[in-house]
Image (cartoon, helix red, strand yellow):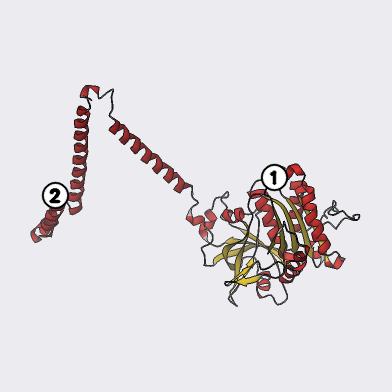
Amino acid sequence: MQHTRLAAWKYLSHPSAKRSCQLWGACIPSYSLIFNNQRQLSLHQSSKELRNRDKKLDQAEGITNSDAGSKVSPRRIGRILLLGSLIGVGAISYNSIQSDPPREHAIFEKPRFTGFDVVDKEHTSSTAILITARPSNPNSSNTPPSFDPYKKSWEQGTWSVEFKQPQLQIARSYTPLPPVNDTESGDLRFYIRKEHKGEMSNYLYNLPVGARIEIRGPYPEIDLPQGVTDVVYLAGGTGIAPAFQVIHTLFEVQGRSDEGSMPNIRIIWANRRREDCVGAPKPAKRSWGTFLNKPNAIEQHAGTLVKELEDLRKKYGDHISVEYLVDEECSFLDEKKVLQLTQLSSRDRSESQQLVGGKKLLFVSGPEGFVRYFAGPKAWEGGREVQGELGGVIGQLKLGDWQVCKL
């Protein structure tokens, strides 16, 4: 084979051969054609030699040509089985590749920022808005409606993304809300409240519909594994957003429909003003020692997030409860409420419903001062923010069987 290639190369390199190729190109085979023919000939010879060797071995084992139709040698059976196995593995690999989501449907490409367009904006109070952002990439419009580009993030638990403020070149983290019925594939919803001297919150609050923004991520925060039995969620202001993620992952994504395996989620949403949770049921009057009795009915003019929370509460019944506290109405979150919440969650689940190795999660989510007061400050370690030591009100309660998560 090597001698044939060398001879062909010397022939085609000779000046007379080059002129002949130019004049008679259709009649003289090309360099690659010579080698392709030689390779096919070599393969044919190898196949012929293999058949001759099998024939000799068959004769030695007493298998004659007359037996060919009824008796096949073990070597041929082995080759047939090996060939079938290789074809099967190839088919499985091909199907696995084909089942992966197309790369053009991916939204983010870390660590770069991705362009989004503000397609919807709703004022929920004088200081808060709900915005919907849609990827600006034209390829995202071809995403199938059933395809969720954020599926892995929803399966993991709570997560966030970063917005970029182009004038100041700063980035801040925000928590996406789960999709609702009319949310298009690739869209992200955010609950944003403008703060005094807040560079990013004021920038986002003042964006009009149609504005271009830049987002990057996603960034995972708290894992929500299978086996979570009880959740107590203390939310201050916009800290309610991750609570929607917790409900979405534990109920919608994990699909825990069995009554005994469904977790109990107790939510306290504390706001400064009634307009921040407009239309929410007011705390019901209750006797000493009771907690979270049935609240008053939701009002007709309730805000979007209040409606979504109440819809979830109705959908999952006693497994979700929500209480709204408002500072200007003198209803506050304190140590007694936290203790009652943790005790109530354990008492609500009967002995037959107790899960072996079940996990109890206590979330504290909201402004920095809110988190510090109830669970102690977060810390910086290795250039990134971490949970830090447990402190504050919850640290004094010594809730040994509850895992505290600061958001």
Q: Residue at x 57, y 64 (%)?
A: 217
> Residue 386: where, in percent of width, then height?
63, 67
- Indicate which label's residue lies in the foreground, 1 or 2: 1
Q: CA distance from mark 1 to mark 2?
A: 78 Å
Residue 114: name its quadrant: bottom right
Residue 241 is at least partly visible in this image = yes
Q: Which residue position holds label 2?
A: 27
Looking at the rendered structure, the secondary structure element under dot 2 is loop
The relative height of residue 85 versus residue 58 in the rendered view (above or below) is: below
Query: Mark 1 or mark 2, which has the lower sequence index?
Result: 2
Q: Which residue position holds label 1?
A: 261
Q: Residue at x 13, y 49 (%)?
A: 27
Q: Quadrant of the C terminus?
A: bottom right
> Residue 31: where, in percent of width, then height?
18, 54
Looking at the rendered structure, the secondary structure element under dot 1 is loop
**Which three-letter amino acid code belongs to the residue tagged 1?**
Ser
